[in-house]
Image (cartoon, rainbow, N blue to C red):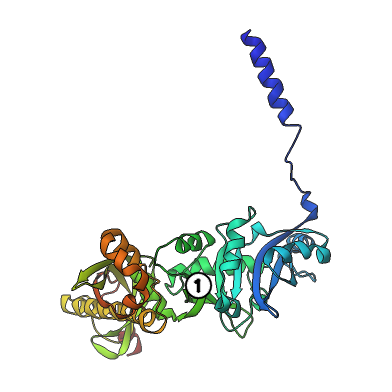
């Protein structure tokens, strides 16, 4: 009897393998996307640009062992329609291929479209089963999303891969807030925290620059954080991985000393004082001396204390600037102070929730930074004076 049951089970398993996937598609009939651009079009329409891989060009380039091919590795196709879904479906009439956009490394949304609102775009991306939640999202500044897809790299043949590579490498600069689709889904579910997305622009040599942050109120772009304001934002929200900060040389005021931030921890708090919210930021950070310009020894206790105080003041100023611009100019709590208030002071939050934008804009801000310099490298003082004598 047991043997009979085993035979039946094996028969059922084998029979299931005969059906295959109900919605499988021949790979030769797919257009593989590496990047997508979304622009504003006339009459409230959307202009969708898709960067598709040209397999023949990629194979040719590989077979020539690094020599360039006459054929472009990617082609860009555009379509205008009422929605992204309409564009993807109707673009098939131009391509004779189904666009496989889940392979897209990056999704670029233009500044013009973002100012009108990106709620419809995010709705589609979160709703569609083909979406890759780890795609990087960027807002193009002073340039269309389509033009960003045309950037070139001297080291990578696929622009979509190139853009994602510079996004990943930017974590060492500390001037970009990397945003993936999954992060946007989390921010939209927040009670008070407004959306932020990294910025991308196009340089004169047709390369791309990723730095700065797009600030939203609701689903609409309201302004930008500069690279330094972005750094303050990253310090405050515990997202700083690494960066370099230039300080004045205490022994040679016209020269600089560069500090490499190795570790950083940011913590947000909210207090209620006289029935008003007080926004607090506490930062602990450690760095090493990476480079010295000018004369003098930088290993004495007195000099290290001066550098640590200067480092603390610099970081504090950047954090305060980033908070002030979101308070006074954008009226957008991108830090999530309201979330902390709702978590630790729920009764107070219930009274403040409906007027949080107004309260956030006028709230007192307190920033405390504790910075330590741990190492000075292999040199105790610069070798340049001796070399130049």
Which residue does the image show at 29% across and 74% down from the upper left?
A: 379
User: Image point 65% across, 54% down: which residue?
Assistant: 130
- Residue 193: give x, y in percent of width and height: 40, 67
Q: Residue 235 falls in which quadrant of the image?
A: bottom left
Residue 252 screen position, x and y as percent: 26, 89
- Position of 284 with respect to 99 (left or right) is left
In this orientation, does residue 199 appear? yes
Say which residue label 1 marks: 198
236 shown above or below 133: below
111 or 3, which lies in front? 111
The residue at the far top in this view is: 1
Q: Position of residue 381 (x, y in %)?
A: 27, 79
**Residue 287 placement: quadrant:** bottom left
From the viewer's side, name the closer residue of 223 and 175: 223
Q: Quadrant of the N terminus?
A: top right
Q: Residue furthest left?
A: 302
- Could you tell me which secondary element the residue under label 1 belongs to? strand
Q: Is residue 30 above or below residue 232?
A: above
Instruction: Work out which residue is located at the far bottom of the displayed protein and give it.
Output: 254
Quarter the C terminus occupies: bottom left
Please provide percent x and percent y for residue 198: 50, 72
Quarter where residue 316 is shown = bottom left
């Amino acid at each position: 009897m047991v043997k009979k049951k085993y035979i039946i089970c094996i028969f059922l398993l084998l029979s299931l393998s005969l059906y295959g996937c109900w919605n499988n598609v021949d790979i030769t009939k797919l257009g593989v996307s590496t990047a997508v651009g979304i622009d504003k079009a006339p009459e409230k329409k959307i202009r969708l640009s898709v960067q598709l891989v040209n397999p023949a060009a990629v194979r040719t380039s590989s077979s020539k062992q690094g020599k360039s091919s006459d054929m472009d590795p990617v082609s860009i196709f555009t379509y205008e329609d009422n929605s992204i879904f309409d564009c993807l479906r109707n673009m098939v009439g131009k391509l004779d291929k189904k666009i496989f956009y889940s392979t897209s490394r990056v999704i670029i949304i233009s500044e013009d479209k973002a100012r009108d609102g990106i709620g419809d775009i995010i709705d589609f991306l979160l709703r569609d089963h083909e979406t890759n939640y780890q795609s990087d999202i960027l807002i193009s500044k002073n340039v269309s999303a389509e033009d960003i897809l045309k950037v070139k790299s001297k080291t990578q043949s696929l622009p979509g891969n190139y853009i994602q590579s510079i996004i990943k490498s930017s974590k060492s600069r500390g001037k970009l807030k990397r945003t993936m689709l999954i992060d946007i889904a989390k921010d939209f579910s927040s009670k008070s925290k407004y959306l932020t997305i990294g910025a991308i622009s196009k340089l004169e040599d047709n390369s791309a620059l990723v730095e700065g942050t797009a600030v939203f109120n609701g689903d609409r772009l309201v302004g930008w954080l500069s690279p330094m304001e972005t750094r303050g934002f990253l310090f405050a929200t515990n997202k700083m991985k690494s960066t370099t900060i230039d300080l004045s040389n205490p022994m040679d005021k016209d020269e600089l000393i560069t500090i490499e931030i190795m570790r950083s921890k940011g913590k947000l708090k909210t207090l209620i004082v006289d029935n008003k919210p007080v926004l607090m930021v506490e930062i602990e950070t450690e760095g090493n001396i990476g480079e010295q310009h000018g004369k003098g020894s930088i290993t004495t206790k007195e000099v290290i204390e001066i550098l640590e105080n200067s480092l603390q003041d610099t970081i504090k100023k950047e954090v305060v600037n980033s908070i002030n611009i979101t308070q006074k100019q954008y009226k957008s709590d991108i830090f999530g102070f309201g979330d902390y208030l709702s978590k630790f002071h729920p009764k107070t939050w219930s009274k403040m929730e409906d007027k949080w934008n107004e309260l956030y804009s006028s709230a007192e801000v307190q920033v405390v930074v504790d910075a330590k310099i741990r190492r000075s490298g292999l040199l105790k003082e610069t070798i340049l004076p001796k070399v130049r004598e």
